[in-house]
């Protein structure tokens, strides 16, 4: 009861049974150009003396991105300070310390720095989460992972499954919020029934345009009552001094820690909701280079592809003829001909419409093919799982233009934008 009283005193109640905290913690420092320092949920929690976690046995869901403004990890600070009773850590894809590549994790082990048990949560079912929570003996789940704003980035499904498990067990759930590097605009098609997978479990669009805290509120209001029988007791420690049109470190002044091994820069994050669709083709999406998702190519492509993409005059983006040799993944040690996506105006850039144009033009080459997975004969095309249905693939195969493909999901996108509105916490264009 004392813990709940502290939470109630710190913030007012908002939609979906959640509370929000930290909207105006410490005074913000001004930076050149008059911008105020953006403060993450973690930073606001620290500045408030960790009060929101007082009295709880805490389990932390995090990865290397869970750092403060001095690059100190939340778990390390909790253990060193002794104020928070942290009893376990849960590592998502790539692991808690980030040592594993895509599709891998670190395994359950003892963290050498802190001595805490780190549970391997990658691919965990909701029942697995509940079992891990019981074993750790927690009553409060804290989530702090930098998201990049795409439906197929698996951390948001780590969030969802762990929320469902926490709700079923009656645990408290606290999200330490961070800015979405793609901002607040939503783009792309909706996930549809029958195409759910680990890269898309529920009905949200491809670029959801929400922070992790906003997405947690959306899950709590829209999905948890059915999945868990009730919402979870959710609190969001808010980001302060951020608008959704602040799309990079030049405007937020926040440190950038790779959320995953192939997300080295904020530009990688900005293009990822679109160019990740090339995972569903036989073209290389830049893994094994220093510019994953920005460099796209294949041996069968040529300079005409870049010329046609620039001729399309897409808003906010230009393309540079590029040649690269991946060190691993597709076409390892093989020269690829392709293009580099150059964002020239992030406010006008639509990553998914851009990537659709790239796919339509790439399909004109004889060597182009969609990735086919024999392990899933019912849904063998990976791009269908990424986009949420066969629609994009079949329309492109049938000769549809890029604008026709994008227009096909306009009504569902509009409906999603309206549906999410009551869960939003931050202001900015396109909300």
Image (cartoon, grey):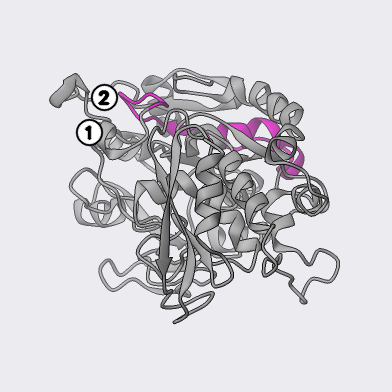
Q: In x, y percent, where is residue 358? A: 59, 50
Tell me what residue is drawn at x 50 percent, y 43 percent: 310
Q: Residue placed at 54% from the left, 73% from the top?
A: 299
Secondary element type, mark 1:
helix
Classify residue 312 by image quadrant: top right
Residue 224 is covered by the magenta coloring: yes
- The magenta region covers 216-245
Q: Residue at x 73, y 40 (%)?
A: 405
Residue, x 51% and y 19% (percent of image)?
Answer: 13
Q: Name the side, left or right, on which 338 lies relative to 353.
A: left
Q: Earlier in the sequence, mark 2 or mark 1?
A: 2
Please name whichever residue, 100 or 107, is drawn nearer the observer in this view of the structure. 100
The magenta stretch spans residue 58: no
Depth check: give the residue in front, 367 or 5. Answer: 367
Secondary element at tag 2:
loop
Disc 2 to disc 1: CB gap under 8 Å:
yes
Q: Which mark is residue 25?
A: 2
Indicate left or right for 14 with 255 as reference.
Answer: right
Badge 1 crowding class, 10 Å Cα cut-off, few under 14, some 14 to 19, many 20 or more, is some
Q: Residue furthest right?
A: 378
Judged from this view, the residue extending furthest toward the bottom is 333
Does residue 333 appear in the picture of this structure? Answer: yes
Mark 2 is surrounded, within 10 Å at the Cα level, by few (under 14), some (14 to 19) or many (20 or more) other residues, namely: some
Q: Residue 234 versus residue 367: which sits nearer the camera? A: 367
Which of the 4 image quarters holds residue 343? top left
* x, y percent for residue 229: 74, 40
Whole-percent x and y of residue 408? 77, 35
226 lies left or right of 109: right
Gap between marks 2 and 1, in whole Å?
7 Å
- The location of residue 363, given as percent across then percent down, is 69, 58
Residue that mark 1 sits on = 47
């Amino acid at each position: 009861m004392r813990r709940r009283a502290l939470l109630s005193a710190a913030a007012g109640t908002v939609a979906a049974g959640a509370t929000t905290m930290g909207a105006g913690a410490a005074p913000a420092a001004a930076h050149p150009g008059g911008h105020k320092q953006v403060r993450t949920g973690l930073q606001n929690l620290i500045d408030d003396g960790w009060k929101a976690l007082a009295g709880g046995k805490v389990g932390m869901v995090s990865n290397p991105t869970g750092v403060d403004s001095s690059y100190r990890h939340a778990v390390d600070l909790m253990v060193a300070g002794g104020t928070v009773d942290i009893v376990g850590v849960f590592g998502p894809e790539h692991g808690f310390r980030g040592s594993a590549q895509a599709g891998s994790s670190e395994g359950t082990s003892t963290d050498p720095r802190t001595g805490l048990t780190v549970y391997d949560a990658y691919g965990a079912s909701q029942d697995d989460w509940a079992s891990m929570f019981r074993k750790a003996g927690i009553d409060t789940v804290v989530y702090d992972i930098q998201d990049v704003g795409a439906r197929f980035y698996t951390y948001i499904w780590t969030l969802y499954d762990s929320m469902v498990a926490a709700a079923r067990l009656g645990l408290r759930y606290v999200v330490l919020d961070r800015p979405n590097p793609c901002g607040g605009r939503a783009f792309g098609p909706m996930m549809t029934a029958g195409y759910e997978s680990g890269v898309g479990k529920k009905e949200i669009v491809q670029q959801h345009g929400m922070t992790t805290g906003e997405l947690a509120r959306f899950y709590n209001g829209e999905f948890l009552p059915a999945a868990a029988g009730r919402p979870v007791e959710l609190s969001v420690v808010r980001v302060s001094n951020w608008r959704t049109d602040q799309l990079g470190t030049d405007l937020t002044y926040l440190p950038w820690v790779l959320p995953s091994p192939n997300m080295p820069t904020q530009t990688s994050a900005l293009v990822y909701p679109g160019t990740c669709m090339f995972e569903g083709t036989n073209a290389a999406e830049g893994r094994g280079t220093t510019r994953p998702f920005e460099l796209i190519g294949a041996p069968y492509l040529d300079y005409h592809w870049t010329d046609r993409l620039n001729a399309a005059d897409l808003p906010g983006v230009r393309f540079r003829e590029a040649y690269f040799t991946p060190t691993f993944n597709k076409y390892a040690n093989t020269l690829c001909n392709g293009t580099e996506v150059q964002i020239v105006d992030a406010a006008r850039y639509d990553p998914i419409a851009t990537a659709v144009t790239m796919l339509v033009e790439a399909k004109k080459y004889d060597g182009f093919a969609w990735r086919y997975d024999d392990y899933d004969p019912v849904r063998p095309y990976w791009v269908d799982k990424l986009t949420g249905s066969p629609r994009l693939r079949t329309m492109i195969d049938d000769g549809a233009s890029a604008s026709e493909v994008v227009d096909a999901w306009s009504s569902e996108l509009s409906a999603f934008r309206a549906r999410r509105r009551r869960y939003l916490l931050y202001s900015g264009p396109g909300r």
